[in-house]
Image: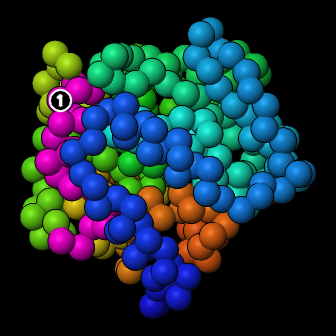
Amino acid sequence: MAASLRSRFWRSVIRKVFQEQGLSVLDERARTLKNSKVHVPFPKVIRVERIDIDGVPCATVRPAREYDGRTVLYLHGGGYVTGSIDASLMLCVPMARTLGMKILLPEYRLAPEHPFPAALEDALKAYRWLLSQGYSAADIVFAGDSAGGGLCLAVVRSLLDAGEAAPSAVLCLSPWADLTHSGSSHASNAASDVLLNTEMLRVWASYYAGGAALDDPLVSPVYADLTGFPPLLLQVDRSEVLLDDSLRIERTAEAAGVDVRLSLWDGLWHVWPALGDLLPESREAFEEMREFLATRRPGFISGRES
């Protein structure tokens, strides 16, 4: 299906906005904060509450109609060096509304000030806090975009390695899962990606990894054993330099016997649902997530297990 007129407009805007490359981390954070203020008004029926989980700033995003006992742990993107609660609300508000599920959104520590495994530790802390609040692992869905998508995969691997229960499903939006950048799409999609470039990603990867190897499975989950993973949905546009990250995760997951679905889109860009209600394709992506959860666990998003 052809990209909508609205998405074609925003694609051209994004190319212009992000044409300036090589910014410092502080400048990237300032740009992210500025961009996060460009959104349609959030519905007043969506409740956003700030909380603290053992030193990790978090927010809960609650839709007007919420299925009791179900929640999403959402890990934001930003290359592990930027990103925040405020920058993620434009995506998380319509996602919560479409899924009918509360979202817990932690603001994990960022590199280079806090390299690996700080983000992983904070994400694990948020998950274990949910368990302490009475949720079971079967009640929780992991979701994340870009670096947050890769972090979701790393958290699941870490939980399984520790003998702990994994969440019921994982939803990855354009995951950054290979910080060695070995995929051929870094060359083939260099001109078509309107948001990312590999040179910038290499710098951010070095900041995040710190003293760890870039091919550590908890840094780059494309090198992880995905045996035992819950159902996994990958959404990615064919134009992205990170396309091969999703393709490789799909192959690895299939080889490990994981229930995985790769959803390839055309004419969009890296993490297009970040524009929320500005794009019809965002709504379609959230509806696809809803359908994925509903078919993998009938009754899960209607509040009843069948």
Find the magenta span and give its range. Answer: 191-209
- Number of on-image labels: 1
Instruction: Give 226 or 146, whichever is nearer the viewer.
Output: 146
Q: Residue at x 20, y 19 (%)?
A: 210
Residue 60, visible in the rendered structure? yes
Find residue 157 and report its image quarter.
top left
Query: Residue at 14% of width from left, 60% of height from top?
Result: 186
Determine the secondary structure under disc 1: helix
Quarter placement of the C terminus = bottom right
Whether residue 198 appears in magenta in the rendering, the answer is yes
How far across and down, in percent of the image, does residue 151 sit? Answer: 39, 35
Can residue 99 be seen here? The reply is no
Which residue is rendered at x = 16% and y = 16% of the image? 211
Image x and y of residue 85, in percent: 60, 36
Compared with residue 184, is residue 206 higher up or lower down, i.e. above or below?
above
118 horizontally vs 281: left or right: left
Among all residues in the image, which is located at the extreme top? 54
Q: Amino acid at mark 1?
A: Ser
Image spot of residue 63 (x, y percent): 82, 49
Q: Classify 40 as above or below 86.
A: below
Query: Residue 255: horizontal and vertical position, in percent?
Result: 25, 53
Instruction: Judge whether 282 appears above or below 226 on screen.
Output: below
Q: Looking at this view, is 45 or 136 the one in front? A: 45
Q: Judge left or right: residue 52 versus residue 240.
A: right
- Characterize the magenta stretch by its predominant secondary structure: helix
- The residue lying at 17 percent from left, 52 percent from top is 198
Q: Nearer the viewer, residue 149 or 267?
A: 267
The image quadrant that residue 162 belongs to is top left
Q: Which residue does the numbered mark 1 point to in the structure image?
A: 206
Give yes or no for residue 15 being in the magenta stretch: no
- Count neighbours of disc 1 (C-alpha within 10 A) and say few if under 14, some if 14 to 19, many if 20 or more: some
